[in-house]
Image (spheres, rainbow, N blue to C red):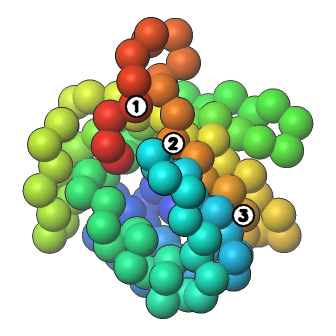
Amino acid sequence: MRAWSTAINAGNDEQAAALFAPGAIVVQGAQVTLATHADAVRWNSGLPCAGHIESVAPEGEQVTAVFVLGNRPGHYCSGPGQKAAAIFTVHAGKIVLWHQIPVPGSGAGAPQV
């Protein structure tokens, strides 16, 4: 999760995609399966904002991370300074689930990462 954030913040979609397992599930409104590495590159390249980790809360196999959104090289972020959150499940060093959720305790919906 930290390596993914570092790659996204640097605008390195290839490196970010390499952290996803084949068949990983991403949920950001709709659920998508990243069947191939190319799918993972496309999905990561579509994220408009950087996400600087503010907090991490592990719970069993899952980790909830809260990010502060920022500008990302080559992309336009409409919400710098806003917070976003995602649940990560990692197996054998690869992300198998990335699920955007509302920021814990905010009572608000999830902004687009």
Per the image, the residue denoted by label 1 is: 110
Amino acid carrying label 3: it is Val
Left or right, residue 102 beside residue 109: right
Res. 30 mark: none
Task: Give percent across and percent down for residue 39.
Answer: 49, 82
What secondary structure is found at the residue carrying circle 1? loop
What secondary structure is found at the residue carrying circle 3? strand
As displayed, is residue 60 above or below residue 28?
above
Task: Give percent across and percent down for residue 75.
Answer: 15, 63
Q: State if disc 2 and disc 1 touch (CB < 8 Å).
A: yes
Residue drawn at point x = 67 percent, y = 69 percent: 24
Amino acid carrying label 2: it is Gln
Amino acid carrying label 1: it is Ala
Res. 100 mark: 2
As displayed, is residue 112 above or below residue 3?
above
Res. 96 mark: 3
